[in-house]
Image (cartoon, helix red, strand yellow):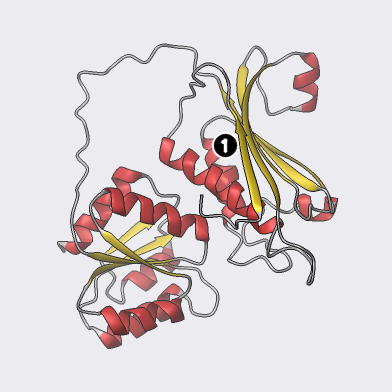
Amino acid sequence: NTFDKSIEISARYFEKAALAYADPTQMEQSLLNLCINAAHAMTIMRKDGEKHGGSLNISVEEVKTDKYFLKLHPESEKGEAYWVISVQDTGVGMSNAVKAKIFDPFFTRGKDKGTGLGLAMVYNIVKQHKGFIDVYSQEDIGSTFYIYLPVYKQKIKPKNNKPVEEIYRGQGLVLVVDDEEIIRQTAKSILEECGYDVILATNGEEAVDIFKKHREEIKVVLLDMVMPKMSGKQAYIELAKIKKDVKVLLASGFKKDSRVESIMRLGIKGFIQKPYALIKLANHIHEVINS
C-alpha cells in the first residue's frame, strides 16, 4: 500500500475463485488506475483547506442477468453471468456533466494531473475483454466504478501444440517516462520482474534532467509520445543532444500511424502501443537494447 496514509483501504472477495478469461497484466493495470483515481478524489482533488482522506473499498461479486439487469445494462448479454469488481471511494464525487465525459480520451478536471488517457484506457481494456464499466457518483459523497467481466464457464485446457512465447529478461537501468501514474507503475512492475532497475520521470523535462545525470547507466528510455510540458518528440531531440546513440522505445495509446512514424524517423529504434502486457514490453525492451 503506497497510498496516502489518510486513506483507509478495505476489500471483500467472493468465496470462490472468480474466473474470467482476461489478461492479468491489463486487468491489474485497470484496477490500479481506478484505485489511483479514487485516492486522488480523496486527496489532491479536495478543495483547498479541506481535510484529506477517506475510505477505499474494493469488492468482487457474481451477478446473473435477468430482464431487469438487461434493461439497466444494455451492453450485457442475455443468459450471461458476470463478475462485478467495484472500486468505491468517499472522495469529491462528480457532477453528471463530468461523469458523461470521464471515459473520453484527454479529458481531465480540476487539479487532476496527466493527459487524461487513464480512464479511456480502462474503458477500452474492459471492452476488449467483452465486459463493460459503469460509474455512480454524487458530488461531495464519492464515486463507485463497476467493472463487469463475463464469468469463465469452461475449464482451461492446455494447448500442447502452441509453443510458449519466451520472455526476454535483462539487466541494467531503464528510464520510464510517462505523465500517467498508472502507466509508469505498470511498466516499472513489469521491468523489475524481468530483472531491470527502473527510474521514473513524469514528463519530458524531468526525463532530460535525469538523463543528464545518468546517461552512462541508462540502457534504454521508454518514452511516452503525448505528454504535457514537453512532448515525446521534443524530449527525444533533447536526449539525443546529450547522447547521440541514446536508445529509445516510443510508447503511445495510439496505433503506429503517420505521427508515430514521423517521430521514429528521427532515430528512435522501436515502438510499443499501450496498454502494456508483460511479454510484449519485455521483448520490445530487449530488442531496442540489442539494436
Q: Which image quadrant is residue 234 in?
A: bottom left
Q: Which image quadrant is residue 196 in?
A: bottom left
Q: Residue at x 56, y 23 (%)?
A: 150
Please name the residue that numbered disc 1 is placed on: 127
Determine whether 179 is above or below 99 in the image. below
Amino acid under label 1?
Lys
Q: Callout 1: helix, strand or loop?
A: helix
Q: Residue furthest left?
A: 290
Determine whether 31 is above or below 247 in the image. above
Is residue 120 visible in the rendered image? The answer is no
Determine whether 60 is above or below 152 in the image. below
Horizontal placement of 217 versus 276: left or right?
left
Q: Quadrant of the C terminus?
A: bottom left
**Spot occupied by residue 238 in the image (x, y as percentages of width and height):** 36, 85
Q: Residue at x 80, y 53 (%)?
A: 94
Q: Residue at x 40, y 58 (%)?
A: 256
Horizontal placement of 164 versus 119: left or right?
left
**Spot occupied by residue 26 in the image (x, y as percentages of width and height):** 46, 42
Q: Residue furthest bottom?
A: 241
Q: Residues within 10 Å of mark 1 (few under 14, many from 20)?
A: some
**Spot occupied by residue 277 in the image (x, y as percentages of width and height):** 37, 45
Horizontal placement of 151 versus 289: left or right?
right
> In the depicted view, which residue is nearer to us: 257 or 123?
123
